[in-house]
Amino acid sequence: MMGTREADTQPAPTHRLCSAALEVDRALARMDEKVDWLTRLTPVNITEIWEGFRDSNYRSMPDSRFSEGLENDAPVLRSELFDLPVREIENHLLQALMLEKQREIDQQIELVRMRGKAGFILASIDLFGHVSEQLLQDARDLLEAVPVVAPDPDDVGAAEICEAARIEVAKYRKRHPDFQCEVVVDPTPGTSLYVSQGDFHVAHDFRTSRSRVDPLIQHEIGTHAVTRHNGLRQPLHTLAGGLADYDELQEGVAVLAEYLAGYLPAQRLRTLAARVVAAHMAVEERAGPEIYACLVDECRIDSKTAFNTALRAKRGGGLTKDALYLKGLAELLAYLRGGGAFEILFLGKFALKHLHSLETLIDDGILHQPEILPPYLDDPSAMGRLAKARQVPLSQFYQERAPS
């Protein structure tokens, strides 16, 4: 049975929100979608970069090309952003959340505006934080402790992944007909898997092992699409696109979903650690080929993963976002070890720092519990893995083989 709470299947009424709160919330949600910083920082010529890098014997990377920026829209967006009546929101908790989100969208606009310019790294640190010495050391320790294993064969392509994803979406829609998640084949090479505006995108050239298909679907649909749906069903629509600083928890839950689905291999955990190393080197303005060489020679990351990791780290000029995957996972596991509730994390997209405020808003009748939950929460095997995740140290947070 799909995880759900039948009493909570209708959206909570918005009459408890003042007019200023409704206006600000809806406007911020629209601006969040319009800025779409991730798409604007993803190269559109990934295959060309790889081929040029390979042909240079891994010595030089061709320049990245990007989609349209925000050069013309940024001033108008900022004017609209700071004209919003945030200070008129009567509920002080909501006001604080909206002020924080307002600042974050301004930081996102600045990040896109600085794409390819000297100030980009500072804009990235302002938005996502820097790579702390402790996080960097934790990543290096993981790369030493977690075994290097041969990757599983890439025996499944986009067509099979999309078929499995459509079956998964159909399960949600059977119980919740209004669940919105289209499965899209992305024509842009090298873009892998991602969820955008609630839809699941699969690059036409993406391949993975059959044993990883369901874990990756639980990462993308079972976390990113489900939390977007639940956020849209809340009176506070910014929970669909994400409150400020939501990325850490969102990616932590998504990686945990892979583990709960039964197969988070050692190389996946090593990749998350390698992303921290790459982000740190990008902040130091190290070139893409130098990052790649470090990942291959010192971190013992395979060539394909090392290239993707280095390219991700150099997006826009040096992006620290990828360090959040390991940081978010570590903080989530610490939260779970402390007895933290799991199901509440699907209420929408938010940071752990927001949890107490959101629980208060639930108690006040402004928000409600998550409407739908991923299906693995009804699986006793997955619940056994969740119990284990509450105890296992990060260095052992992987599985040697997929469930039979």
Image (cartoon, rainbow, N blue to C red):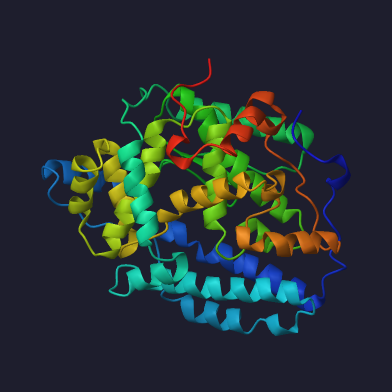
* Extreme residue in the top direction: 404
Count of number-bearing discs: 0
Residue 206 appears anywhere in the view? no
Quadrant that contains the N terminus: top right
The picture places residue 186, in percent across and down from the top left corner, at: 45, 42
Residue 57 appears anywhere in the view? yes
In the displayed structure image, the side of residue 265 where residue 216 appears, left or right: right
Instruction: Examine the image and state in which quarter residue 168 appears.
Output: top right
Depth check, front residue: 30 or 24: 24
In the displayed structure image, the side of residue 242 where residue 126 appears, left or right: left
The picture places residue 267, in percent across and down from the top left corner, at: 37, 34
Residue at image x 47%, y 77%?
A: 74
Image height check: is 323 above or below 55?
below
The picture places residue 13, in percent across and down from the top left corner, at: 86, 60
Depth check, front residue: 110 or 289: 289
In the displayed structure image, the side of residue 46 where residue 346 appears, left or right: right
Residue at image x 78%, y 63%?
A: 360
Residue at image x 82%, y 53%?
A: 11
Instruction: Examine the image and state in which quarter residue 180 appears.
Output: top right
Image height check: is 251 above or below 205?
below
The picture places residue 305, in percent across and down from the top left corner, at: 31, 39
In the displayed structure image, the side of residue 323 where residue 337 appears, left or right: right
